[in-house]
Amino acid sequence: MNVLVTGASGLLGSKLVEVLVSKGYKVYAGYFGNSPKAGFPLKFDISDEIGVEKAFELSKPDVVVHAAALTNVDVCEVKRDLAWNTNVIGTKNLVKLSKKYNAFFVYISTDYVFKGDRGLYREEDIPEPINYYGITKLKGEEEVKSTLKEYCIARTSVIYGSVPATGKTNFALWIIEKLRRGEQVNVLMDQYNSPTHNTNLAEMLSEVIEKRIMGTYHLAGATRISRYDFSKLIAETFNLESSLILPTTSDKISWTAQRPKDSSLNVEKASRSLNNKPLTIHESLKRLRSEIEG
């Protein structure tokens, strides 16, 4: 089976390619900037329709996993044309070709499609994004649903992993690095989400592909937690000095774009449907430690 993964050098994409290759799939690793380390590298710009057509001609995918996106929330707010071209037009191009090739389409979405005023959102709750990033990701969902019959929309939250992707660190690694250097770090105590270990997410997505599970699913960590408490657990897991973590509140941070206060996701549907269950924060951090320390 041929699988085309976009964003294959990203935090999720790189891990997913690794997992799918290990299971014997022929994986085309789509990228635009940094070259991926596994799979057959395929460089193209998702916002360029001709480039997408060529990528499909080469890969002839049975399955497409669309993990590429402009995810920097503040950049999306300021560079709206870039955000729209990447997150909406890019998705539209991939959806159009997936329909032509009869490919099963997996769209990686986000908890940021929700307003964040109550948390533990279910799949059927009405999205109401409060920033432009969330708007573009929701538009992407709509492109998928309006065009395709065979698809899975997988919403996730705060992905972290043991290896920095595309030159960027992730929240867990950032905390570990800061504490190892003995530096103080201010972390929000009033922002809640569902931190998701990239290996756990890649395994869940692999099962979605294998079984062609269709519909909308919240594929995220099984624990609703504040950034502050998450940081404390990271410190505890890696035997680092937790007193260096200082609590702060979102009103003290001058962001360009608004953030949801509580965008945590209810993962009961995924827990019922999948053999690879969403992991609790303790299980995930234990796995993260074993990946980092070997």
Image: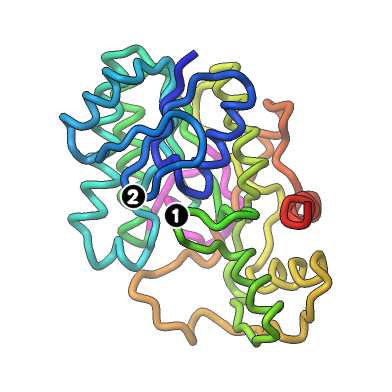
Disc 1 crowd, CA 10 A, few/some/many (<14, 14-19, 20+): some
264 to the left or right of 43: right
Residue 243 among magenta residues: no
User: What label does residue 33 carry, if any?
Assistant: 2
Residues drawn in magenta: 113-129
Marks 1 and 2, the one that precedes in the sequence: 2
- Residue at position x 70%, y 85% from top? 182
Q: Can you tell which quarter of the image residue 115 is in?
A: bottom left
Residue sitting nearer the eye, 161 or 108: 161
Q: Give the residue displayed 45% in from the left and 17% down from the top.
A: 2
Q: Amino acid at mark 1?
A: Thr
- Look at the numbered disc 1 and give the secondary structure of its residue: loop
Residue under the point 50% across and 60% down: 116
Q: Is residue 124 magenta?
A: yes
> How far is disc 1 from disc 2 in space, using C-alphas?
8 Å
Label the magenta part by its dominant secondary structure. loop
Given the image, on which type of amino acid does mark 2 rest? Answer: Gly
Residue behind mark 1: 166
Q: Residue at x 35, y 61 (%)?
A: 131
Image x and y of residue 134, in percent: 37, 54
In the image, is 134 to the left or to the right of 15? left
Residue 11: x percent and y percent? 52, 49
Q: In what element is the residue under mark 2?
A: loop
When the figure is inspected, residue 208 is found, relative to residue 134, above or below; the finding is above
- Labelled pair 1, 2 in contact (Cβ < 8 Å): yes
